[in-house]
């Protein structure tokens, strides 16, 4: 692993979303992801089996809910933040939303 590989890996940390993870179907135990409509094994609707919990009020919401039914928490904004690409300085750890040639905090040159 060279220096360029280390810098590229440190700069391009991507956050994972719930659809990227594998879960077990509560009905049959088959491997499912939350972006599926039905379980490929038993046909149970995924939305009816899984709920997402609001981090502010704790209310259980539909899997495809855009906002919490009780509170003012915006699930779509959370997904947008998770998909946003972030570059991280390998020296000081400063996170940037755009790629610079030099870290604005510690001055490390990237290219």
Image: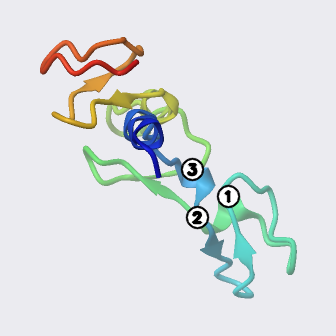
Way the structure is coloured: rainbow
* Residue under numbered circle 1: 47
Task: Using the numbered discs, state the Cα–Cα distance from disc 3 to disc 2 in whole angstroms.
Answer: 8 Å
- In this picture, residue 106 sits left or right of residue 59: left
Eyeballing the image, is 33 above or below 89?
below
| Residue 62 badge | 3
**What's the residue at 40%, 43% (across, down)?**
6
- In this picture, residue 83 sits left or right of residue 99: right
Tell me the quarter of the picture where residue 60 sits: bottom left
Number of marks drawn: 3
Q: Position of residue 63 (x, y in %)?
A: 59, 50
Badge 3 crowding class, 10 Å Cα cut-off, few under 14, some 14 to 19, many 20 or more, is: some
Q: Quadrant of the C terminus?
A: top left
Question: As rendered, which of 88 and 56 lies closer to the eye?
Answer: 88
* Residue under numbered circle 2: 50
Asked if the residue at tag 1 contacts the one at tag 2, i.e. Cβ–Cβ closer than 8 Å, the answer is yes
Q: Position of residue 50 (x, y in %)?
A: 58, 64
Asked if the residue at tag 3 contacts the one at tag 1, i.e. Cβ–Cβ closer than 8 Å, the answer is yes
């Amino acid at each position: 692993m060279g220096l360029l590989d280390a810098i590229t890996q440190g700069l391009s940390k991507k956050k994972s979303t719930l659809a990227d993870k594998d879960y077990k179907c509560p009905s049959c135990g088959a491997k499912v992801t939350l972006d599926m409509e039905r379980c490929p094994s038993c046909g149970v609707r995924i939305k009816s089996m899984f709920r997402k919990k609001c981090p502010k009020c704790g209310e259980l919401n539909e899997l495809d809910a855009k906002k919490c039914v009780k509170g003012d928490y915006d699930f779509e904004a959370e997904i947008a933040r998770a998909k946003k690409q972030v570059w991280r300085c390998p020296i000081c750890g400063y996170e940037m939303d755009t790629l610079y040639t030099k870290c604005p905090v510690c001055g490390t040159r990237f290219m």
